[in-house]
Amino acid sequence: MLTLIRNGEVYAPEYIGKKDVLLVADKIGFIEDEIEIPESFDQVKVIEASGKLVVPGFIDAHVHIIGGGGEGGYKTRTPEIQLTDATLAGITTLVGVIGTDGTTRTMPALLAKARALEEEGITCYVHTGSYQVPVKTLTGKIEDDLILIDKIIGVGEIAIADHRSSQPSAEEIARLSSEARIGGLLSGKSGVVNIHVGDSMDHLAVIEQVVENTEVPISQFYPTHINRNHHLFHAGIKYAKNGGYIDFTTSTIKKFIEDGEVKASTALKLALEAGVDISRMTFTSDGQASLPDFDSTGRLAGLSIGKCMSLYEAVKDAILIDGVSAENSFRAVTENPANILKLSQKGRIEAGKDADVLLMQKETYQIETVFAKGKMMVENGQALIRGTFEEE
């Protein structure tokens, strides 16, 4: 199947102007100023993209695809993600994680859900483990999970600086990050260690100790929730300026913002103004996670759920409200996570890459069309393909 996207303004994610983009099966075939189709050749679907932006499909690198939570008991376990939760938000690649509950949320279930989402039409990878240290792996060893299981690309989310963590020491973090690094090197994967950072004033100290006292590079770690409060945000800026990656969580509730959380789009703006290189920063949604509100004594006071759509909303807000350039806003959900996670076929509008492509309205940034591996999933803002158990 050939699909020609004609006359769109392309962000690759850098702006490259008005181009024609030809999708060949599941790959981007050609990008030219103008692509002519022979009159005798009628096997091409032509999409007129004048007045629209052509952007790489979004990568959401932290999603609880099998649900999360349970901090308020069994009834508060959140549901699994559905296909259109991702596609309607422009997300064509997901990375699934397990959080607080490493007992009823298991690696076999996580891997099975990732394969189900792949069968439904989008790309999905997973990390091995959960909040807890020692890491609960699939095969019994971090290295084996990374080397032998195609969908496992990293470790996490490992919790630090949080009352729900297993309070890991620097030695424990050093050991698991070394195992992740070896597994990544031997399998050609990132082997990144995705770190959940909580509210504690310890911030990123345990990671910094590992980097200072061992040969594990700072790039081995991928800490998230850096915008959860102002003091962690400022610690995160320092960490990123020292060469680390930082991730801003887009799912939130009004009370979190009132209590001092830095809105993700604003965090991106402020970090750029502080001199953080755009390549060090990403957005992730924390989709399907529980968003627990604990009081000063650690008692659960309320609970909400993360939404993948918040990823798109943060990108749009960064551009339209916070004044971040479209190029930098798109980088936070395309090229940057692709580079951090070593997803070489993702994150760019470039010949030979996977045909994960969005068409957006130029003025409003509204998502109109979504292609995942060359297949149209969303048209005119409506889902063409739904998950197996999703109703029309």
Image (spheres, grey):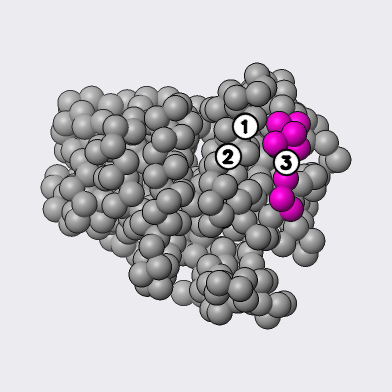
- Residue 148 seen anywhere in this rendered image of the structure: no
Give how far apart the Cα atoms at labels 1 and 3 are. Answer: 10 Å
Q: Quadrant of the N terminus?
A: top left
Q: Quadrant of residue 71?
A: bottom right
Say which residue appears at 28% left-offset and 60% top-offset. 380
SS for callout 2: helix
Give how far apart the Cα atoms at labels 3 and 2 are. Answer: 10 Å
- In the image: residue 105, left or right of residue 261: right
SS for callout 1: helix
Secondary structure mainly formed by the magenta segment: helix
For the residues labelled 1 and 2, say whether their Cβ atoms are less than 8 Å apart: yes
Please name the residue that numbered disc 1 is placed on: 209
Determine which of the numbered discs, if any, sits on residue 205 in the image: 2
Q: Quadrant of residue 180?
A: top right
Please name the residue that numbered disc 3 is placed on: 169
- x and y percentages locating residue 8 in the rendered image: 19, 40
Q: Amino acid at mark 1?
A: Gln
- x and y percentages locating residue 33 in the rendered image: 17, 26
